[in-house]
Image (tube, rainbow, N blue to C red):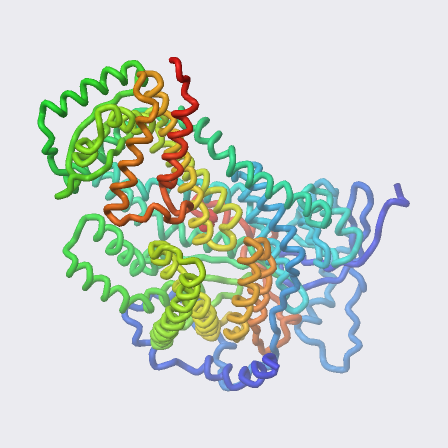
Amino acid sequence: MRSRSQTGTGRWFDGAENRPQEVRVRLSRNHLEFMPWPPRPQAATASPPSEAELAASQPSLPGLRRYARSKLQVGEWWRDSATPVGLPDGGTLWIPAGHAMGRQLGGQSLGAQMIGSWVLSLCGLILLILLVAWFDRQGAGLLARAALPLVPTKLDQAVGNEVEEQIEHEWLKPSQLPERRQKEIVDRFDDIASRVFPGVPLDVRFARQGDRAGFNAMALPNGTIIVFDGLAEALTDDELMAVLGHEAGHVKHRHAMRQVVQGIGLLSVAGVVLGDFSTVAAGSMASLQALRYSRNAERESDAEAQRLILREHLPNETLVGAWSKLREEMRREGRSDRGAEWLSTHPPIAERIESARQAAQNADPVR
Amino acid sequence: MIDNKIELELVPMAPAGAAPKPPAAPAAPGALPVPPAAAPAGPMATGLLAKLHEQRLEFTGTGAEYFRVWIVNTLLTLATLGVYSAWAKRRKARWFARHTLLAGDSFDFHGDPRRILAGRVLALALLVCYGHAFEWSKGAGIAMLIVLYACGPMLFAGAQRFKLGNTSWRGVRFGFQASAPTTYLSCLPLLVAWTFVSVGAGLGLHPVLLGVAGLALSLLFPLAHGWLKRFQHRHARYGTLQFDFELPVRAFYGLYLRLIGVGLLAGLAAGVITAIGAGALKAAASGPASQLAIFAPLATMGVAWVIGWPVYIARLQKLIWDNTRLSGGIEFAYELPALRLFKTLMGHGLLTVLTLGLYWPFLAVRIARLRVEGMTVLSDEPLDTLVVKSGRGHGRGAAGDGVADAFGLDIGW
């Protein structure tokens, strides 16, 4: 045991005042000991002793100090910097950089060992990259899937009602579609929904978008689906059913709430990785990712529309027809359908048509 | 070369800073009640002599080591779903403190991670509540605002107390202590600003009224900023030594005027640069205009920030430290070469972007070195013989005032 003890010099502060004191330190297996060294300040200078020297000349140190190692609060050991050792009496002993005692006292934790070694920290970096990549591919989805059931559906209702009231005031105008036609569509969809989306609360309404008819439909988290007149007039009944199926998919999968949950997850991951660098960078990374998840949600809803078509024996190409009309409308309005995909909430329309076409071809021809 | 220049400037600068009273200071409207303890003590009166001893702060950390610290912190934080972030923050604070040296001895940071964690949970809760209170109802929003008014200033002071009370040099801790009235009074201008910006817009006040309020606020902002800095520096201490700060109101306005000038120039330069960049992009990729519309303002802001931030930070720090002193005849001089900071940001910032942020720890260390080494401590006697007693009795109890009360939490991210 004796042979394992180490000695060296250190710098001690008693915690009551900031006067440094050089000490000789000995570290044995269970104890840390030190005593002032040199024992007395040398009054070798010719000048009269300063106040500090006078104070130091009084033997304020009772000599040897001994502490149990288990009582010490040792700071993490880092190469090239002194290691502080917090003493139970409030003092601090600094082990100089480069001395083995510092590493022995403060270099044993996992963090210190990883920081002390390039190999370990590069392994850490690879793990970190894998972790971020995994979170991006699967983790966020898993998180949302795990957390979503914890979010009460009442909240979806409440948020949806709130939004509905707001947009009704601010930019919805009453529909000009004949009552009879409205009822026809609603009745047919209610009938279909009872089979395709059992248990999902859905309520189809019609409206105009300000002074324009509006070629669009939207789903709110409370199950309200708003169909704009422009869309209702342009699409055939079958196509309308498919688009309503798409919107019902948003409600069924609680996409709005999922986006909130995923958004929180994304922001926190980006905040951890990039937050130290810049919150703006973290925020924009997170919103780019959120857009990608939004496009995936649209794809998921397109699949729901496809399921409705299959289940209700509508013509296979119904969704292709609906999306083609949407594309024509977009072109007419001069909206580019070739914008940057990664900046859009929806997948490119060409891709959506293509996947609808493929789904139509893969559908069982006999049925 | 830069070092020499600073040495030359320091000598005439010190007496100017210690001159009896700058004419602007007494004119500070609504000056805060000054605790009698902060009244100038004996050594401060020796204003006509330059300080004999200069001690430059030194930063010894390397980017290579901080890179590894950063990896460990980030990895463990992600793997523990964020819980480790408090421990990560302590490690980061300790790493920077322990690599900052004054007269050969390093600083240290002692913050308890559990309190950092508590502070973060509290901050998150407040943030979420504040963000959504007005969505729930107007009553809830106003209730939340009252909670913020009541707790905000105390939390701010508590964070100061946590930060300083847990920082030490040569075994003696810094500290922060301010009475509740002083705390509330110092935060008042910013609280008023906050109210007008958020609530005024939220409740839908008349735009003209909002505009007038906004103008008044922006005219008062430099003063409010100065008040806050005075609050932070006047109530800080090192052991038994009290810091003091004389608010140079005129200089604060000068700083912001200059900042506006630099901002305009930077905005102009940034506009030209992005216009050229956009032209090149358009020629190369014929991308749609909507994309450019998104990127142009972002790029302009980025370039303006890179040009404006170094100037701002350099001037602000100089302004603050030149007017700060510590009883016992200690003064400070701060010289941060804005040009070097700008060059570092440009060169190494580019590397950071090119490496998708992996170079960031290296850049952080370079910025920290510039900022730390800009500071010089001036004193009448050498720091080695200047004995400072710990503020509160002996030993670990010194941390007590920072930890005992409920508000001594670390807020900030």
Quarter of the view holding residue A353: top left
Please determine whether, in this image, residue A252 is positioned above or below residue A292: above
Residue B88 relative to residue B125: left or right: right
Closer-to-camera residue (B322/B210): B210
Q: Name the residue: 48% across, 46% down.
A: A271
- Quadrant of the snapshot with the N terminus of chain B: bottom right
Q: Where is residue B264 in the image (x, y as percent from the top left)?
A: 35, 72
Residue A70 relative to residue B305: left or right: right
Closer-to-camera residue (A261/B235): A261
Q: Where is residue A147 in the image (x, y as percent from the top left)?
A: 43, 28
Q: Name the residue: 31% across, 34% down.
A: A323
Q: Position of residue B31 (x, y in %)?
A: 31, 68
Closer-to-camera residue (A20/A105): A105
- Residue at the right extreme? A3
Please determine whether, in this image, residue B91 is positioned above or below residue A258: below
Residue A244 relative to residue B75: left or right: left
Q: Where is residue B103 in the image (x, y as percent from the top left)?
A: 65, 69
Q: Name the residue: 36% across, 24% down.
A: A306
Please determine whether, in this image, residue A10 is positioned above or below residue B220: above
Is any atom of residue B331 visible in this view? Answer: no
Quarter of the view holding residue B231: bottom left
Please determine whether, in this image, residue A358 is positioned above or below residue B291: above
Q: So how many labels did they put on this image?
A: 0
Quarter of the view holding residue A193: top left
Is any atom of residue A72 visible in this view? Answer: yes
Q: Name the residue: 55% across, 64% down.
A: B367
